[in-house]
Image (tube, grey):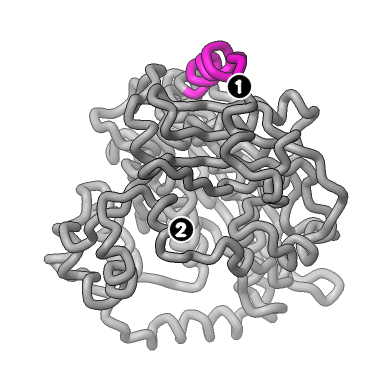
Amino acid sequence: MKKTLSFLVASLIAACSFGQTNYDPRILILSPGNVKAERSFEKDIKGYDDEIKKDTRDRSLDPKELQQQPANIQRMMKSEVEYRKHMTFVKEISFRSEQYLSYRFYEKFTNLLILLKDTPSNGKMEDLKKLAESTQLQYVLSFPSVSFYKEDGISYARLAVQLYDHATGSLLIDTTFTGDWFNPGFEFACQDSSLTCTIHNSIAQALDKVIYNVAVNSPTLKREKELWRQRLDVLRHDQYARSFDKSFIENIIPAKDSNITMSSLYQLMVNDDKTKFVGFFLEKRGRQGFKQLSENKQDNNVRILNEKNIRDTGYLNDMPQTYAYIVKAVKYQGKWYYEKANVTYFEPHDKDEGHLEYFNNLQEWGFFKENSTTPDPDFWETHLFEKVKDLRKDPDWDKYGTTIWKTEEEENRNYIGMYKIVADQLKGKKSVQPTTITVN
């Protein structure tokens, strides 16, 4: 299964000792240094710069909105606004890097701090060290030089990139990346055959390296990785290895339900009073492409975890073949209500590894107490067994109650406090809906 940043092999560098804050990661991004361009590009670059100067949009910050943000986000927003005041086409390299790194890191690091500084890079270690010390930021992302040139009628940007780590006093990256003018799509989409694309293609390569190096040195990810490993051991020895009574679930799920293959059941968890259960299923499927999966009406929501890169040729025609899902159920007023959920296609090395790998999703489904290896009794009342909430009591009701939440609130008003599994079926929710596929 494709691993997230949390599962990258951690470095032994003691980066957490630097600085007085708990921000992680802490990155300073400098403006590009020496800029060279063939004469044929001068008009294009001037045109870009003129467009930027003509942009009169008000980018000032709303003080009330700013105050509602955490301190680190306030600093980042202010940094962006200040940097934009002297924006040029070439400085888009730094600005785009800050935005992309903030986006990629934020899901895992809500306490990140990534700031821009309009100081041209010169590539000297002593200057990078001084900047890290004066700003109290661990990393300095530097672009000592950028050059634009043509070769065989194609435009290129050659970008020198450095990532200085103050915790070790070393350069984790000191490499030159070259990008052509073809539109790469996705996050770095741009107008094909443009000078902008040369920048996007070069920084796309560089920022992947930055993300990796920051991740493997992150104290946050080191702690998470160790907790993840400890929890996996608990699941493997205390839960996964347990014997279970298959007849318990066979008496609840009718044999005529062709959407559930009972022979694929490999583990079953039942709560103490035997009014709830979650069963784990896994089987091998035939080879199929994305189109076949999207047209399959068997499952409502499907997650695909693919080791291949989505940009690879034939990516959509060769989907993983291991098919796993859970069946969760609640007994309500003497009747069982069950639901197939968390359908996932992935590709483990073998079936046994796939069983444990999918079973390990319990870490994400609230099986453990926060920051602990102790099982949480509330597991049977949350996440998989969530209850219908009264949206009118939500702090954001005044903000969303008459718009986004209006229909949902009206539909759920008579089912507040009831398990969603039960409520959905009592409301007559269709068991088969248009397929939603998420590719990771």
Q: Quadrant of residue 247?
A: top right
Q: Check disc 2 and report its element: helix, strand or loop.
A: helix
Q: In the rendered view, would you say 26 is above or below 99?
A: above
Q: Position of residue 345 (x, y in %)?
A: 70, 46
10 Å crowding of disc 2: few (<14), some (14-19), many (20+): some
Q: Quadrant of residue 15?
A: top left
Q: Position of residue 216 (x, y in %)?
A: 54, 29
Q: Is residue 86 magenta?
A: no
Taking the image as shown, residue 94 lies to the left or right of residue 80, namely: right
Identify the image quadrant of the N terminus: top right
10 Å crowding of disc 1: few (<14), some (14-19), many (20+): few
Taking the image as shown, residue 259 lies to the left or right of residue 21, namely: right
Residue 202 is at least partly visible in this image: yes
Q: Amino acid at mark 2?
A: Gln
Residue 130 is at least partly visible in this image: no
Q: Identify the residue at image location x=61%, y=49%.
A: 206
Range of magenta residues: 228-244
Instruction: Give 3 or 23, whichever is nearer the viewer.
Output: 3
Residue 425's disc is 2
Looking at the image, the residue that sits furthest to the top is: 237
Instruction: Give 108 or 363, whichever is nearer the viewer.
Output: 363
Q: Identify the residue at image location x=51%, y=62%.
A: 93
Q: Position of residue 264 (x, y in %)?
A: 73, 35
Q: In the rendered view, would you say 6 is above or below 180?
A: above
Residue 245's disc is 1
Q: Is residue 233 magenta?
A: yes
Q: Amino acid at mark 1?
A: Asp
Instruction: Give 32 or 378, whichever is nearer the viewer.
Output: 378
Q: Main secondary structure of the magenta part?
A: helix
